[in-house]
Image (cartoon, rainbow, N blue to C red):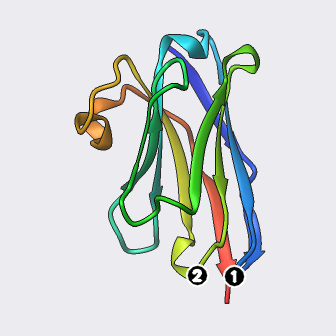
Amino acid sequence: QVQLVESGGGLVQAGGSLRLSCAASGRTLSSYSMGWFRQAPGKEREFVAAIDWSGASTVYSDSLKGRFTISRDNAKNTVFLQMNSLKSEDTAVYYCAAASRYLVPSIKRESFYHSWGQGTQVTVSS
């Protein structure tokens, strides 16, 4: 089983940027497709973005496409989420997750993933 640890969250002003990282241990990250989800206070966890094992294929939430970019560095066993033009509604706990396959649109569902990180808080002040 792979262990995932997110980092890079924090407090940022609206319009700013943050880059989240998800570091894997226990297994090599290149074995997995990876996803980012987020959960805002009082709301259900929602899909943000996903990437296949090689980085060649990505998929995004329609509402976030263009502002967020998912990428990976398998040599560093890390997946990234670059977030630009942040808005107050982006405030949430962000989670990374690992899946054994890459299949769209299934990879947008939480149930498709078998391993999750503990989350990192992102707060955007307006």
Residue 9, placed above or below residue 11? above
Residue 74, placed above or below residue 112? above
The residue drawn where x is 57% and y is 56% is 68
Specify the quadrant that holds the C terminus.
bottom right
The answer to which of 99 and 75 lies nearer the viewer is 75
Residue 39, placed above or below residue 43? above
Marks 2/1: CA distance? Answer: 6 Å
Q: In which quarter of the image is residue 46?
A: bottom left
Number of labels in the image equals: 2
Q: Is residue 87 left or right of residue 115?
A: right
The answer to which of 111 and 60 lies nearer the viewer is 60
Q: Quadrant of residue 108?
A: top left
Q: Could you classify mark 2 by the number of other residues whose Cα lies within 10 Å: few (under 14), some (14-19), or many (20 or more)?
A: some
Hey, which residue is sitting farthest bottom in the picture? 126
Residue 68, placed above or below residue 35? below
Q: Position of residue 19 (x, y in %)?
A: 73, 52
The residue drawn where x is 74% and y is 65% is 17
Q: Position of residue 33 (x, y in %)?
A: 45, 24
Pointer 2 residue: 88
Q: Where is residue 7 in the image (x, y as percent from the top left)?
A: 72, 45
Mark 2 and mark 1 residues within 8 Å of each other at the beta carbon: yes
Please report whichever mark, 2 or 1, sits nearer to the chain's N-terminal start.
Answer: 1
**Which mark, residue 14?**
1
Q: In which quarter of the image is residue 5?
A: top right
Q: Could you classify mark 1 by the number of other residues whose Cα lies within 10 Å: few (under 14), some (14-19), or many (20 or more)?
A: some
Q: Is residue 26 left or right of residue 107?
A: right
Under circle 2, the secondary element is helix
The residue drawn where x is 76% and y is 20% is 76
Q: Mark 2 is on which residue type?
A: Ser
